[in-house]
């Protein structure tokens, strides 16, 4: 498991972005410890990179959430 700082570094984004995506329900950590620390798995890098690329294409978060929900349903 990776800390939020290390995960953000590997993904090429910021800790604040991860917190925002969690708050908006777009991308959740794999585990939240009792002390509130967020932990991510290496496998989640692929999904976050996908989200970041969609944002790079200027897709709104609502559309990204719909795409992810559709992908999870299949």
Image (tube, helix red, strand yellow):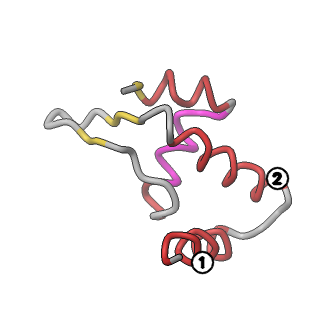
Q: Secondary structure at mark 2?
A: helix
Residue 57: x %, y % from top left: 85, 59
**73 versus 23 height, above or below:** below
The residue indicated by pointer 1 is 66
Q: Which one is in front, 52 or 20? A: 52
As drawn, which residue projects farthest toward the front?
74
Q: Secondary structure at mark 1?
A: helix
**13 versus 73 height, above or below:** above
Residue 20: x %, y % from top left: 51, 51
**34 versus 3 height, above or below:** below
> Where on the picture, by quarter, is residue 31?
top left
Q: Is residue 55 left or right of residue 41?
A: right
Residue 35: x %, y % from top left: 17, 33
As drawn, which residue projects farthest toward the right?
57
Label 2, label 1: how far apart the Cα atoms are: 17 Å
**Bounds of the magenta segment:** 13-21
Of badges 2 and 1, the one in the foreground is: 1
Disc sitting over residue 56 in the figure: 2
Q: How many marks?
A: 2
Q: State the residue at coordinates (42%, 52%).
A: 28
Confirm whether the magenta stretch covers residue 15: yes
């Amino acid at each position: 498991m990776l800390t939020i700082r290390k995960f953000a570094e590997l993904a090429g984004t910021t800790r604040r972005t991860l917190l925002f995506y969690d708050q908006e329900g777009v991308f959740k950590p794999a585990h939240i410890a009792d002390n509130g620390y967020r932990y991510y798995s290496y496998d989640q890098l692929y999904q976050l990179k996908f989200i970041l690329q969609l944002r790079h294409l200027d897709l709104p978060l609502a559309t990204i959430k719909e795409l992810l929900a559709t992908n999870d349903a299949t």
